[in-house]
Image (cartoon, rainbow, N blue to C red):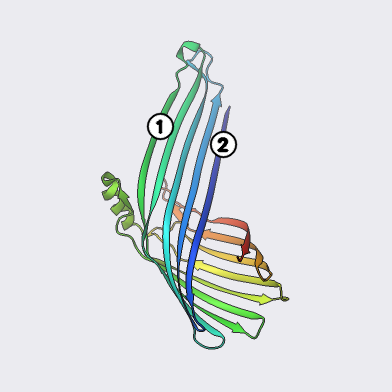
Amino acid sequence: YRQVRFAREQSITSWSVPFAIKSEKFSLGVRIERRDGRAQERFTMTESGFNPSGVTKAYQKTVVDSTRWGQWNIRFGVAAQLTDGLRFSAAVQPASTALVQWDYRNRVTPEANSSETNLTFELYDDQEFRYQLPTVVQFGLAQTLGTKAAVSAVWVYHSKVDALISSPLNYYDLGRQMADELRAHQQFRLGGEYRLTEAWTARGGVQWSESGTDFDDHSSYQMLGLGLGYQERDWGVDLAYNALRASGSIQNPGDGQSWDLGANHQRGTVTYRARF
């Protein structure tokens, strides 16, 4: 008898503080942002039914691989009103560093036919890394259509990094090798919104992102977003739905066949805004 379970958990939190100087047709701003995340993968396998005359009656193997990370970002932006209905924007986020804490646990708990041989094996390791993140550059255009509709287009560029791991120093060479497998990549977003009433607004958009590696992995994706917003003078609520499709493949080293790595993700988001 064999039972296998695999579970994956992920959570991300963020907050930001923006500052801006505005005139009638020009805006200059900066945003300080903090992001924290946690991810964990847990694999459990239970096996029994061995030969009664042997040593092992049953055993359970548990592997837990988890990471916690945090980073500070600063973003500079500018916006200009080119015409009555056309607005241009640009932003840059300099390269930053993320602190990553990694924990690994591999535990095997046997159940022997003789209690004297019940010895638990456990392998545990924890490391702390500093990951280098790329510079991000963004340009956008937004055009209003009458008094109720608007469309926008955004281009985003992510630069290449020289060394993915900068600390500890004994991982620096490995970080450079990992960075050689990454490449600069870009995203394109197109969206629009339509004001249904004075308070309600419907939104929709698509996003395309190319792969950030030299492999045919799943880092390239396409995303569809739909939203509905309600706005009062001092507060507002937005409801959003995102559907993401990731594409890619990997070659099986055993037989050389290509394995499809396609994945689909769906997410719902509620955002509340208040003005003080």
Amino acid bearing label 1: Tyr
Question: Residue 176: x and y, percent?
Answer: 29, 54
Q: Earlier in the sequence, mark 2 or mark 1?
A: 2
In the visual, does 236 lie left or right of 31?
right
Question: Residue 218: x and y, percent?
Answer: 47, 57
**Residue pictured at 41% horizontal, 42% vertical:** 102
In the visual, does 149 lie left or right of 50?
right
Question: Residue 10: x and y, percent?
Answer: 53, 47
Question: Residue 213: x and y, percent?
Answer: 39, 59
Query: Would you call the spot at circle 2 few (<14 residues within 10 Å), some (14-19), or many (20 or more)?
Result: few
One can see residue 138 in this view:
no
SS class, disc 2: strand
Q: Which residue is mark 1?
A: 124
Q: Which mark is residue 163?
A: none
**How many numbered circles does the render carry?**
2
Relative vertical location of residue 256 with respect to residue 188 in this rendering, above or below: above
Amino acid bearing label 2: Arg
In the foreground, 223 or 93: 93
Query: Would you call the spot at circle 1 few (<14 residues within 10 Å), some (14-19), or many (20 or more)?
Result: few
In the foreground, 199 or 145: 199
**Residue pictured at 42% horizontal, 47% vertical:** 255
Q: Which residue is mark 2?
A: 5
